[in-house]
Image (cartoon, coloured by chain):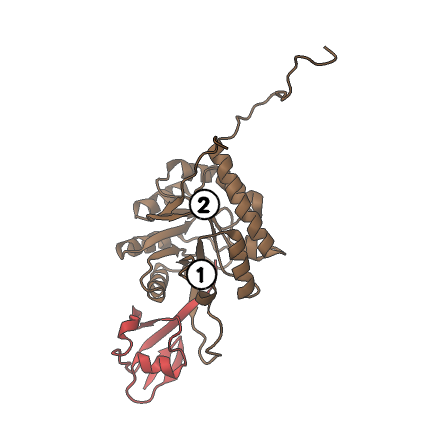
Chain colours: A red, B brown
Amino acid sequence: MLIQLNGEPRPLEGDSTLTNLVESLGLTGRRIAIEVNEEIVPRSQHGQMRLNDGDRVEIVHAIGGG
Amino acid sequence: MSQLIQDTPLIVAGRPFASRLLVGTGKYRDFDETVAAIEASGADVVTFAVRRTNLGQNPDEPNLLDAIPPSRYTLLPNTAGCYTAKDAVRTCKLARELLDGHNLVKLEVLGDEKTLYPNVVETLAAAETLVNDGFDVMVYTSDDPIVAKELEKRGCCAVMPLGSLIGSGNGLLNPATLALILEHAEVPVLVDAGIGTASDAALAMEMGCDGVLMNSAIAHARHPVMMANAMRKAIEAGREAFLAERMPRRQSASPSSPFAGRINA
């Protein structure tokens, strides 16, 4: 299946949860926040959150700004 | 020293802050410089932006929240770069998740890329949505006293009019409208944007502003850490001058030395 990850198309193999995606990106334990289809998915629910074809996923972090 | 008036802390949404200088984290050379400047500024509240994580890059790259830990500072996520109420609300929700439920945010919704002037229509809409969703909203806005009051009515916990355009360093271009906002506000008023140098910050505080938020004035000084230190002193000096209540202005001179006893009398 194909998801939109931070605005770019990204193919995923088979069944995947948000936790699997975060692991595959090497972001486990990082200070990030995630929304799927414009809804926040709390950290505690990443393991249950199954991704579906066409999902729009945003992964954000803090950067310098004023 | 007994005549010093004991100042009260700046209180925003029930949170007390010893420093009335709030600072940003953008435009610094690196995290070391960011940390040193923030330390020198004495700021308690530090604002940052929320952006897409760079994927496929070094996963060990340093993170701003490690350099500026939430355990030591009150972090103030901002919605810089948002041009619609919808994007600003999404950004605030992401920030709240990022900071484990911390709900104090700096709302800014911009009108265009050239002026970065606030779009007050979108700002008012976003403020209402965020307040209803439980956020404590410090809001960047124009120096329009009516808009400031409308934002306050929607439950914003601090109103933050621009002194001049973001990143311009032009100081307080319209002190008269700022004075009107201060006269009528019932929530803290902080100048956010436009500060260029220490006297700009001192002037805002002398006028009775509750605080000043700045980024470029420190980060783009040739010596940011020294400027951060200067800003700390300017904020304190301006605040004390406000509390001390300045002398009245007068048209005529008034000698400071007595006339009596002059040797040529």
Residue at image mark 1: B48
B146 or B220, nearer to the observer: B220
Identity, as a three-letter code, of the amino acid under mark 2: Gly
Give residue B13's mark: none
Q: Position of residue B262 (x, y in %)?
A: 70, 14
Q: Position of residue B193 (x, y in %)?
A: 49, 51
* Label at residue B211: 2
The three-letter code of the residue at mark 1 reads Phe
- Viewer can see residue A35: yes
Determine the image quadrant of residue B218. bottom right
Q: Nearer the viewer, residue B92 or B122?
A: B92
Q: Residue at x 27, y 79 (%)?
A: A47
* Farthest residue, direction bottom: A14
Chain letter for the residue marked with disc 1 in the picture:
B
Asked if B131 appears above or below A16 in the picture, the reply is above
- Give the quarter of the figure containing the C terminus of chain B: top right
Q: Distance between the Cα atoms at labels 1 and 2?
A: 18 Å
- Can residue B174 be seen by looking at this rendering? no
Q: Secondary structure at mark 1?
A: strand
Q: From the viewer's side, name the closer residue of B130 and B188.
A: B188
Left or right of residue A51: residue B106: right
Mark 2: which secondary structure?
strand
Among the 4 quarters of the image, the one containing residue A43: bottom left
